[in-house]
Amino acid sequence: MDQTDKTLLRALQENGRITYHELAEKTDLTVPAIRDRIIKLKERGIIRGYHAHVDAKLLNKDITAFIMIESVAIHYQDLIDYALQEPAIQECHSITGGGSHLLKVRTKNTVSLEKLLSKIQCWPGVKGTETHVVLSTFKDSTFIEPDETELES
Amino acid sequence: MDQTDKTLLRALQENGRITYHELAEKTDLTVPAIRDRIIKLKERGIIRGYHAHVDAKLLNKDITAFIMIESVAIHYQDLIDYALQEPAIQECHSITGGGSHLLKVRTKNTVSLEKLLSKIQCWPGVKGTETHVVLSTFKDSTFIEPDETELES
DNA sequence: ACTGAAATCGTAGACTT
DNA sequence: AAGTCTACGATTTCAGT
């Protein structure tokens, strides 16, 4: 993980379809060298994948919400299994502080959000939920600055 | 927005570097037709961009946290401006329920999280914060299912 | 990590429905 | 307006060095 790798990671996060040729220009390396490095970054798990970012509202998902769940420990695995199966749930984290888990969900409207909440409240071990509907999103980035010195390799 | 567009959106969300040829095979269209559709999806804002997804932990960001902020309305714009400037803040939403805003942040460790929190608590209008540190992430998808009938076009 | 050739892919214009 | 065909240039890939 040297300066060149960091440049590649920044560029690929900014534009996931950038060509090897452009990356070669940015780094003063040749195209095959770029390719080798990117393959290695993938093999090391640093690059997990490439994804198109689509606009949720334009795909008829008008509601984004965060749902804090209070659940009992014995049923944590059930909760995870249910969360993985539900397409409207984009993220599921276990967290510290009030609540045991936090979900990020996308639904078409308030009706579908209500249906989803009813489902969740029926999951085994769920004692309570607290929903925060997103009114506006001012920043939504997936960019991670690779600026720290790395420990490994 | 027909069945073909939905297939394209699904495929591009799953693999942002998929070739037009592969997409042509999936949809039984020719490569130029695929290209035209993708250009239009971009022009309509449905495709916002393409991004490499990198592993935060492997880039020395060990902490993910959600910070709920209670702020006074007069200073909302200040809060947004500060959030946009801070690279550790990945998301900033205004929300309903307890708290006025929710941040998703990534930091190297608890020390840098503490520093960030100190900064945020000094922002004008911030009355209080409530931090939820992520212990484990069980689902982290950006996939949005384009399965509803669309209103526009 | 570089070179160079071969295969694959993306792009643009003209044409068809 | 949307798709196809064809041809050309760009990109990716895969040797060997």
Image (spheres, coloured by chain):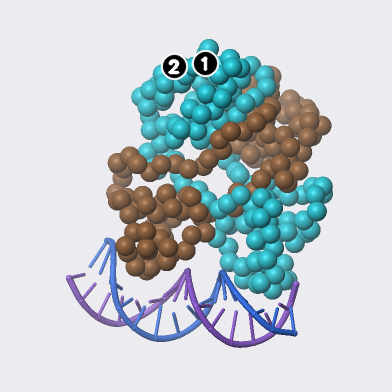
Chain colours: A cyan, B brown, C purple, D blue
Per the image, the residue denoted by label 2 is: A122
Visible residue check, residue B108: yes
The chain that hosts pointer 1 is: A
Answer few, some or many: residues within 10 Å of disc 2's Cα (few below 14, many 20 plus, some between 14 and 19).
few
Q: CA distance from mark 2 to mark 1?
A: 7 Å
Can residue B71 be seen here?
no
Left or right: residue C10 compared with residue A71: left
Helix or strand or loop: what does disc 1 sit on? strand
| Kind of residue indicated by mark 1 | Val
Instruction: Tell me the residue that label 1 is attached to.
Output: A126
| Residue B69, position as x, y percentages in the image | 64, 24
In the image, taking residue B31 as reference, residue A149 lies left or right, namely right
Disc 1: CA contacts within 10 A as few (<14), some (14-19) or many (>=20) = some
Percent position of residue A142, x then y: 61, 44
Q: Residue at x 34, y 59 (%)?
A: B27
Location of residue B130 in the rendering, given as x and y in whole percent from the top left corner: 67, 21
Q: Position of residue D10 (x, y in %)?
A: 54, 75
* Closer-to-camera residue (D12/A12): D12
Q: Residue at image x 56%, y 35%?
A: B139
Q: What amino acid is at disc 2?
A: Cys
Residue nearest the observer in this picture, A28 or B71 = A28
A31 in relation to A149, above or below: below
- Toward the top, the furthest residue is A127
Kindly identify which chain the residue marked by label 2 belongs to: A
Above-or-below relation of C17 to A139: below
Q: Residue at x 42, y 49 (%)?
A: B10
* Quadrant position of residue A88: top left
Query: In the displayed structure, does residue A149 sit left or right of residue B77?
Result: right
Q: Are marks 2 and 1 in contact (CB under 8 Å)?
A: yes
Q: Residue at x 79, y 58 (%)?
A: A2
Task: Tell me the SS state at disc 2.
Answer: loop
Residue B1 to residue B145: above or below: below
